Amino acid sequence: MPEISRFFGIVIQMYFSDHQTPHFHARYGGKRAVVQIRTLKAMSNLSPRVLGFVVEWARLHQQELLENWERARRGEELLEIEPLE
């Protein structure tokens, strides 16, 4: 799964699947989240603090995430997105 960002030890990845709404995956310390890009709703077992960082980052980069989703649908290389600082 292509990595598109990394911050505070959190790894953000994305791949396209025909049967899913636009989303990305976050990993941290053996735990995971799947976050819908448009609504920022998450299915997660990340701690609330880590999930908060992920959602804050996604809110700041929502348009870039949607653009990467479209790139993935077309089979194009995904662009790296700036980390949360």
Image (tube, rainbow, N blue to C red):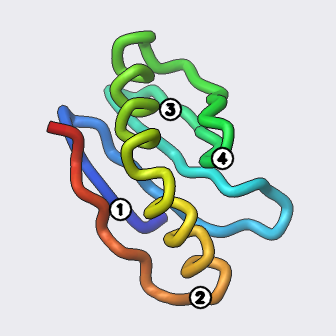
Which amino acid type is shown beneath numbered disc 4?
A: Arg
User: Which residue in the rendered view is the most extreme toward the left?
Assistant: 85
Crowding at mark 4 (Cα within 10 Å: few <14, some 14-19, many 20+): some
Which residue is labeled 2 in the image? 75
Which amino acid type is shown beneath numbered disc 1?
A: Ile
Image: 36 above or below 78: above
Between marks 2 and 1, how big is the CA–CA gap? Answer: 15 Å
Between marks 1 and 4, how big is the CA–CA gap? Answer: 17 Å
Of the two numbered discs 1 and 4 in the rendering, the one whose residue sits closer to the viewer: 4
Q: Earlier in the sequence, mark 1 or mark 4?
A: 1
Q: Position of residue 59 (x, y in %)?
A: 45, 39
Q: What residue do we see at 65% from left, 43% from top? A: 36
Dot 3: element: strand
Q: What residue do we see at 66% from left, 46% from top? A: 38
Between marks 3 and 1, how big is the CA–CA gap? Answer: 15 Å
Between marks 3 and 4, how big is the CA–CA gap? Answer: 19 Å
Judged left or right of residue 51, residue 43 is right
Q: Nearer the viewer, residue 13 or 84?
A: 84
Q: Earlier in the sequence, mark 3 or mark 4?
A: 3
Image: 48 above or below 43: above
Q: Considering the image in quadrants, where does the C terminus appear?
A: top left
Which amino acid type is shown beneath numbered disc 2?
A: Gly
Q: Position of residue 46 (x, y in %)?
A: 46, 20
Between marks 2 and 4, how big is the CA–CA gap? Answer: 21 Å
Judged left or right of residue 85, residue 35 is right
Crowding at mark 1 (Cα within 10 Å: few <14, some 14-19, many 20+): some
Q: Earlier in the sequence, mark 2 or mark 4?
A: 4
Which residue is labeled 4 in the image? 38
Dot 4: element: loop
Which residue is labeled 3 in the image? 32
